[in-house]
Image (cartoon, grey):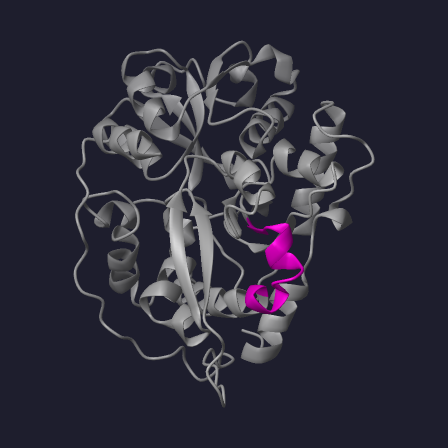
Amino acid sequence: MRRWLVWWWLSVSLSACAGPPMTPTAPPPAQHSPTTVNASTPPPRATVRVGHAPALANAGMYLASERGYFAEEGLAVEYIPFDAAARMITALGADQLDVGAGGASAGLFNAVARGVGLRIVGPLARHEPGHSAVHITVRRDLVDSGAIRDYPDFRDRTVAIAAKASVNEYAAHLLAGRGGFSPTELNLVELGFPDMVSAFANGAIDAAIQADPTATVAAERGSAVKWREIADLEPRFQFTVILYSAALATERAEIGRRWMTAYLRGVRDYHEAGVLGRDRATVLAVAGRYVPIADPALFERSGWTVVDPNGEVDRASLEGQLRWLIAQGSVPASVTLDAVLDPSFAAAAVARLGRY
């Protein structure tokens, strides 16, 4: 993981630095449900190990840490970086992680099929029109020359994705469908998001399903164009979710409920900043302390996703992803979303916090 973070810094030509001190802010306006929690006695202390691929969409977690929401729930959170959620599944299955933050992958559904009690318990990034942080990026010379104007022009093109049998390949499948051709007519290559920046510069790829901030970096360097938002493929694209280990979802369920309560308080703060435009500078400063990027202002030029402030995931989007994985033969047909999805933790948190 350490080597991956160093490569992130090198690939975007940035060096990590701490953001400015956090300034406490007032709670959300009165028209919203309260996000404070009153407890008569302090909850018992517990440590929660959280796997994350550092990104702005995780700012709800980071805010919950920085603003003391986890501490108020008696929780000490340890963050462990990963380059993709698919690589968290083994650690979650072995109870080396308690919480994972990333996409619903074949590895997740296959683990559940084997009886591993992993659960999708809440939302992360949902891409909607105007609120997307993943883009279909295209090499600039192909756009300038008119070689790629519309979806059918992607046939036989080399398209980079972060991982196969994941939400990233599912997005490429949707792209091919919009173009009216088979996904097999795409030359898919696996590259990390930072690696895509260099691949565009040297002409190794034609397009990519690429997340910010690296999509913005590629565009600002002039090697690529943010051609379409990922929400153009699906208007409520549930790209990433919160996962619980079997232990946290069962014998440590009370800790799981407390974690979700603190997390949703942070998510509501993120929603205020990202969707409503309030107190963005503070949120960016906090994110800059967790994401290896020197200039948090780069996030301001990037897309901000929707993270549902009531802890809801878009079921239809996840159902589509699971159907695709089953059709690809990557997941047994016996797996259902109900075997994986557990909304009870978010429901318990909203019962304490009130609906936003």
Q: Nearer the viewer, residue 338 or 235?
A: 338
Vertical placement of residue 266 versus 1, above or below: below
The magenta stretch is 242-256
Q: Nearer the viewer, residue 221 or 324?
A: 324
Vertical placement of residue 91 versus 268, above or below: above
Is 28 on the left-hand or right-hand side of 244? Answer: left
The residue that appears at 38% across and 51% down in the rendered structure is 79
- Locate the N terminus by quadrant: top left
Is 276 on the left-hand or right-hand side of 151? Answer: left
Q: Residue furthest bottom?
A: 40
Q: Residue furthest right?
A: 334
Query: Residue 248, position in %: x, y?
Result: 59, 58
Q: Quadrant of residue 256?
A: bottom right
On the question of residue 20 being in view, the answer is yes
Query: Residue 230, position in %: x, y?
Result: 50, 37
Q: Quadrant of residue 201?
A: top left
| Numbered-mark total | 0
Vertical placement of residue 74 versus 220, above or below: below
Q: Nearer the viewer, residue 89 or 59?
A: 89
Task: Tell me if residue 244 is in the magenta stretch.
Answer: yes
Vertical placement of residue 7 versus 337, above or below: above
Query: Residue 178, position in %: x, y?
Result: 62, 26
Is 17 on the left-hand or right-hand side of 151? Answer: left
Query: Residue 23, position in %: x, y?
Result: 22, 71
On the question of residue 321 being in view, the answer is no
The residue that appears at 45% across and 81% down in the rendered structure is 36
The residue that appears at 55% across and 67% down in the rendered structure is 255
- Locate the C terminus by quadrant: bottom right
Q: Nearer the viewer, residue 169 or 185?
A: 169
